[in-house]
Amino acid sequence: MRNDLLSVYRVLRPRRCAISRGLQVPVRRQRQWREVTLACCSAKTGLPCSFCPSRTFTSLSATAADALPDPPQARRMKTSSLIRTMDPTNLTPGDYIKSVGWRLIDCTCLDVRPSRDGYPRVTLMHPESPGQQDASGFHGRLSGFLYYHQPPRAPPLAGELRFRLTTSDNPASFSSGVDYTTRRGVPWYIPLPTIAGNQTFAPLQHLLTDVDMAVPRQVMELAREHHHSFKCGDAKGSRFLHAFGQPFDLALYQLEHKFVFVGQKHIARTRFQRMTSFETCFQTAESAPQGERLRHFPYLGSILCCFEPSTLKEHSGKRVAVIRVLRSLESDPVRPNPAYTGPLLPHELCPQEGELLMTLRRRKLRPWARDVDARPTWTRGNSAAALAVLFDNALVYGSMA
């Protein structure tokens, strides 16, 4: 009997189905292949065995004969929503979404799966931690509408998926709702290059190009060429910016900060070091004559800020960008670093709301500034060259976001 079952299994897509107890089936999960023992459901229930897709069993127990999906997985499957538009003007109560708690994530994520008619079936998953609150003032479960946001006076590649929090499933409540904002002070979003380049988001691509007509096919293809990995709408790391004045968060105790600048027909990526730190040099018997360098992070916390074209006199006639501090984040306020052991600090070095971000260079206090057109040296390139995208967009679309 077992041989007969195995023969049938080999014919009917061996990597997708299973019917016999103890059969080893490879299951794809988190980019790794593992083997899960599938138990025949008739052992205890008396029900006949049936063919099932392998993805259904990605969280089944390897030992229990009557294994069931774990509670978070079950909740995710029960709370998925079939959406038919992401155009705010065409929303229906059927497009209303409620998030599900998920213990294994640390940011709000979107799970997308295709339905039989090609429309996306989505599940919005939020971190399941008691008492957690986002910057919008909402606790726990999120309810609202997914929608596509194309910023005004911005290049087509700057479009992004957002989540609008509403009080009911009535589409009329969309205008009075607020965009879900993360604890980092920025909107939860998934940029167009991520949607275009991720095959998991294929149903969303179909919705944007063929149903809502929000993104022309040539723009979707261009975005696919500039695909950027983005785990979730609250991912730390890269910031997608298209204009001066567009807010982004900056962690003060971080050596390197990554940025993605979205232009008319291309995307430029760069990283800046020592934005919120400085070095001191001292000599010891072992380090002489060059001396040793110590890196100092005088402050902890996170700030919300933005890039601006410099209006300082010393930058006249040049394309130089500076950073304006908007505010300190309530979830991670600016505070002195108790582990700081460097020289005495000037008061102006501490980030101040409404002021330029200051830094210490060769023991002198000066605004953080980068020249787009500075010549690269033989030891390092000009990381600020990517900021040229913001200057170019300012000429085409306007100066500020």
Image (cartoon, grey):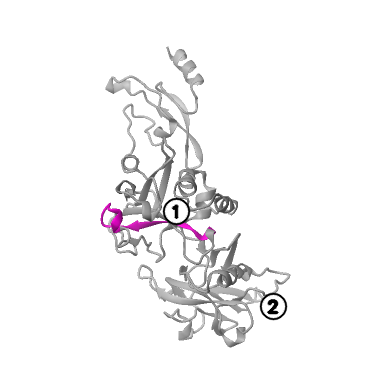
Which residue bears the numbered disc 2?
289
Label of residue 382 in the image: none
Which residue shows up at 44% across the image and 31% down it? 54
Residue occupying image coordinates x 39% and y 36%: 59
Which image quadrant: the N terminus? top left
Q: Nearer the viewer, residue 285 or 106?
A: 106
What is the magenta range?
Answer: 157-173
Identified at 56% across, 80% down, the residue is: 310
On screen, residue 66 above or below 120: above
Number of the label disc, if any, that sits on residue 232: 1
Mark 2: amino acid? Pro
Q: Is residue 233 visible?
A: yes
For label 1, count other residues whose C-alpha is less than 10 Å away and answer few (under 14), some (14-19) or many (20+): some
Density class for disc 2 (Cα within 10 Å; few <14, some 14-19, many ≥20) is: few
Secondary structure of residue under mark 1: loop
Determine which quarter of the picture holds residue 164: bottom left
